[in-house]
């Protein structure tokens, strides 16, 4: 079932002309948003735009609500790039929390640089071209509904660990140098990471399953 559902992401994407909105729903501690050399501390109810970097300090956390119903939670000492978020206009007036699926087609691309991120997706309109991707040093996740948690822990030497747990829904993961394969609900994936600091090449090793 997961293969059939996620493969639907291959539907022809619509032409997006307007960005969606991303709002700070909850915040604890110090959370920064920036683009280039400019950054500032976020506040609850503040909106952030695409092509910005989100960073949480130690002992800090933040939850973002996207206008397609997606929820992004970032834990302590985490960094996520909001690379893309497009959404077609819609006329639905119901609250996002009450919607059973996203209100209109959307395209989302996040990059998890460090730390952990938990994403909850309302069912995407994949038949109308909606997509969601999360990129990280270990590879790319694509999904169309459900909840997952991803974590990247890297050292200055370029050695680290990536873990991914799909808690519900349907998703596929493509490790660096590999191909997309379904992610099983409740069975975490773990990869040892080694990044060549000269070439930038990434080497993965699957961690033993417990």
Image (cartoon, helix red, strand yellow):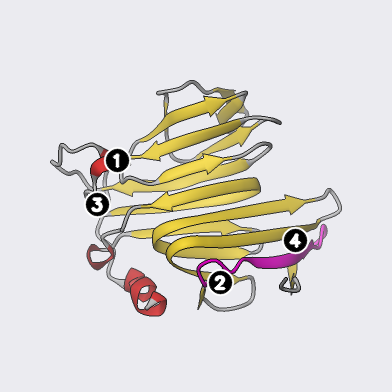
| Mark 2 or mark 4, earlier in chain | 2
Question: Which residue is tagged 2?
Answer: 174
Question: Which residue is tagged 1?
Answer: 97
Q: Residue at x 40, y 75 (%)?
A: 2
| Residue 98 pos. (x, y %) | 25, 42
Q: Residue at x 81, y 62 (%)?
A: 196
Q: CA distance from mark 1 to mark 4?
A: 41 Å
What is the residue that sits farthest to the right in this orientation? 157
SS assignment at label 3: loop
Judged by depth in the image, the label closer to the viewer, 1 or 4, is 1
**Mark 1 residue crowding within 10 angstroms, few (<14) / some (14–19) / many (20+):** few
Of residues 60 and 114, which is closer to you in this image? 60
Q: CA distance from mark 3 to mark 1?
A: 8 Å
**Mark 3 residue crowding within 10 angstroms, few (<14) / some (14–19) / many (20+):** few
Of residues 29 and 136, which is closer to you in this image? 29
| Mark 3 or mark 2, earlier in chain | 3
**Mark 2 residue crowding within 10 angstroms, few (<14) / some (14–19) / many (20+):** some
Question: Which residue is tagged 4?
Answer: 200
What range is drawn magenta here?
A: 184-200
| Mark 4 or mark 3, earlier in chain | 3
Q: Is residue 58 above or below residue 2?
A: above
Q: CA distance from mark 4 to mark 3?
A: 42 Å
**Which quadrant of the figure contains the N terminus?**
bottom left
Q: Pointers 1 and 2 in contact (CB under 8 A)?
A: no
Judged by depth in the image, the label closer to the viewer, 1 or 2, is 1
**Mark 4 residue crowding within 10 angstroms, few (<14) / some (14–19) / many (20+):** few
């Amino acid at each position: 079932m997961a293969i059939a559902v996620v493969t639907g992401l291959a539907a022809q994407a619509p032409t997006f002309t307007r960005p969606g909105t991303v709002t700070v729903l909850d915040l604890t501690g110090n959370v920064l948003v920036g683009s280039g050399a400019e950054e500032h501390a976020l506040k609850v109810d503040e909106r952030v735009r695409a092509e910005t970097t989100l960073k949480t300090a130690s002992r800090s956390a933040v939850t973002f609500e996207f206008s397609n119903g997606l929820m992004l939670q970032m834990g302590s000492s985490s960094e996520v790039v909001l690379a893309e978020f497009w959404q077609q206009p819609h006329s639905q007036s119901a609250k996002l929390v009450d919607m059973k699926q996203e209100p209109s087609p959307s395209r989302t691309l996040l990059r998890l640089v460090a730390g952990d991120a938990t994403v909850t997706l309302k069912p995407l309109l994949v038949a109308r071209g909606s997509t969601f991707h999360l990129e990280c040093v270990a590879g790319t996740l694509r999904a169309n509904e459900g909840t997952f948690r991803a974590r990247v822990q890297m050292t200055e030497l370029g050695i680290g660990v990536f873990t991914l747990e799909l808690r519900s829904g349907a998703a596929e993961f493509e490790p660096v140098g590999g191909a997309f394969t379904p992610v099983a609900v409740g069975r975490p994936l773990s990869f040892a990471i080694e990044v060549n600091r000269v070439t930038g090449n990434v080497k993965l090793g699957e961690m033993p399953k417990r």
